[in-house]
Amino acid sequence: MKTDRILIVAAHPDDEVLGCGGTIARLATEGAAVTILILANGLSSRPDFDPVRDAPLMKLHHERAQRAGALLGAREVVLAGFPDQKMDTVPLLDITQTIEREIARVQPEIVFTQHGGDLNQDHVLTFRATLAATRPMAGHPVRRVYAYEVGSSTEWAFQQFEPVFRPQVFFDITAHLETKIAAMQVYESEARAFPHPRSPEAQRAQAQRWGSTVGVHAAEAFACIRDLR
């Protein structure tokens, strides 16, 4: 797939790595200009979080997002700063317009976003806002929209919420799997030990599982929302 401009829309810092880190690395290596938009701040929902006392921790978390994006080869990481796990307290229009502004600025041909059937409500709102922001109006730059799964959210819905994650598009990330895993390890506070889905072992197993499904060593899977050729 040859394209020049790609926008990754993520609800939280680390979703972009878990969902499509290998694909970001692959497309960046192939010459695509990848922009990552992260909507929520990623920390403010934690117990006893204090915005003043924990300002250095927030700064570190966002620096890690920048480092992870750079490791994957993204041109830039944009942090919108919406409240973590409380995006439902923000008008959906505000979220949609944030995505629309990045689309107008970046002019992406492909947008990757969260899956709409996830357990995490911020992911669901991100999906809905992305679909609104990518409405196929005449002259709109976005021609393809794909939704990615996130370990510890998509599968933990146990297919009880619609839409169920049913991937039809796969990217071979055999050459980029270890870069994805290294980028996730940049998020020290988010990485977990096996058998947690965010552990290196689980990420590797997931990629190998999808790879075996389509005949390669490692792959990432996506639900195709729209594909205009």
Image (cartoon, rainbow, N blue to C red):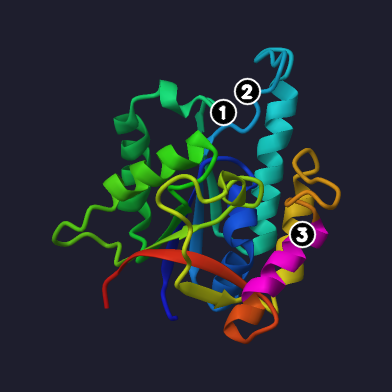
- Provide the secondary structure element on which disc 3 rests: helix
Which mark's residue is nearer the viewer, 2 or 3? 3
Query: Are the residues flagged by discs 1 and 2 in contact, CB closer than 8 Å?
Result: yes
Sequence order check, earlier mark of 3 and 1: 1
Sequence order check, earlier mark of 2 and 3: 2
- Provide the secondary structure element on which disc 2 rests: loop
31 inside magenta stretch: no
Distance of label 3 from label 1 (alpha carbons): 25 Å
The percent coordinates of residue 51 (x first, y second) are 65, 15
Amino acid type at mark 3: Ala
| Residue bearing the label numbered 2 | 45
Residue for point 58% across, 31% down: 41
Distance of label 2 from label 3 (alpha carbons): 25 Å
208 inside magenta stretch: yes
The percent coordinates of residue 60 (x first, y second) are 73, 34
Placement of the N terminus among the 4 image quadrants: bottom left
| Residue bearing the label numbered 3 | 202
Residue for point 65% across, 28% down: 43
Residue for point 68% across, 69% down: 207
Taking the image as drawn, is residue 17 in sight? yes
Q: Which residues are magenta?
A: 200-210
Circle on res. 84: 1
Taking the image as drawn, is residue 80 in sight? no
